[in-house]
Image: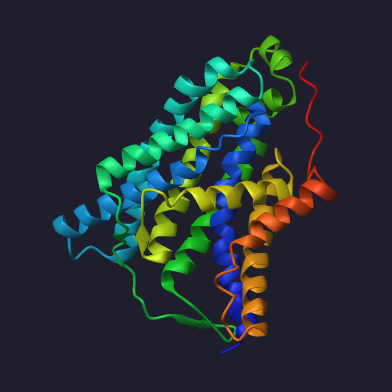
Amino acid sequence: MDIFAQQLINGLVLGAMYALVALGYTMVYGVLNLINFAHGDVLMIGAMVGWSLLQLIQYLSPELPGYLALMLAIVGAIPVCVIVSVLIERVAYRRLRDAPRLAPLITAIGISILLQTLAMMIWGRNPLPFPQVLPSEPLHVMGALITPTQVLLLLLAAVSMIGLSLLVERTRMGRAMRAVAENPRVAALMGVNANRVIVFTFAIGAALAAVAGVMWGANYASAQFAMGFTPGLKAFSAAVLGGIGNIYGAMLGGILLGLIESLGAGYIGDLTAGVLGSHYQDIFAFIVLILVLTLRPSGIMGERVADRS
């Protein structure tokens, strides 16, 4: 087996999940100039709802093909995550748009703790074994192994990112999102309903997080009430790496961060005979975040944030 090719595939899979979550961060920041640190827990809600739906599907239709069962779980998780995210915007953030920057940040942390507590009350505190509905036998690609779950994850991530790009660039709502991101007051004078655009942005970010959450659970065969914290922070690091506020930067940052984690952990594992590789994998995202904030705060594809004063 080609070790480098295996690390490359693992990095692409991990980066695709980071990119889907990072898009939610960067879109909300683009239109609202706010970091929604509760977004990682929307991923967790998606994974937990997906787990529940897969349990139900397997009970009602055990002969249903695995790909179809997983797609139904994703389709069912999306509206739940959208409702949760829209409620977060309406209840927690809307009244704080003109508040000092610290107020939304503290509110986001509170919402995150609230969502985790509710999930613990509903699904329990112990990790839940995610149903493995797809074949476990890996496929051989470029001298490396990739599972059918990872193939589906990469396809869904690619379709989601292409669809988001087309929505932002080719549709009326996409133009409204760009207008509000540039200057919400001028956009309002031109007839753009800023509240509607902001709610739509939260909904789209939540839908992408739902896809990432279900596929995260399927890929790692586990779901838990606190699972969204670390992926959320890493996805935020990916958004900063690519350029917060730039959707293409979030995509690039997510993929790059996944590759950096996978390759970095692999080489550290080689240098230490496998003792330290997996244990130090999580530090790479935060090393990257510190370096980017120090050397290039705007990120790789960072765009100047419009002056909204």
The residue positioned farthest toward the right in the image shown: 295
Q: Which residue is at 48% across, 39% downward? A: 206
Q: Position of residue 270 (x, y in %)?
A: 64, 84
Of 56 and 175, nearer the camera is 56
Here the colouring is: rainbow
Quadrant in the rendering for residue 105: top right
Is there any visible trace of residue 246 in the rendered image? yes
**Side of 81 where 201 appears, left or right:** right
The residue positioned farthest toward the top in the image shown: 189
Q: Which residue is at 52% across, 27% downward? A: 107
Of 125 and 254, nearer the camera is 125
Quadrant in the rendering for residue 100: top right
Image quadrant holding the N terminus, namely bottom right
Q: Which residue is at 48% across, 46% downward? A: 209
Count how many numbered circles sit on residues in the image: 0
220 is higher (above) or lower (below) than 308? below
115 is higher (above) or lower (below) than 240? above
Of 91 and 75, nearer the camera is 91
Q: Position of residue 227 (x, y in %)?
A: 43, 52
Q: Position of residue 266 (x, y in %)?
A: 62, 77
Q: Position of residue 202 (x, y in %)?
A: 52, 32
Q: Which residue is at 60% across, 83% downward? A: 142
**Side of 135 where 87 appears, left or right:** right
Is there any visible trace of residue 160 in the rendered image? no
Image quadrant holding the C terminus, namely top right
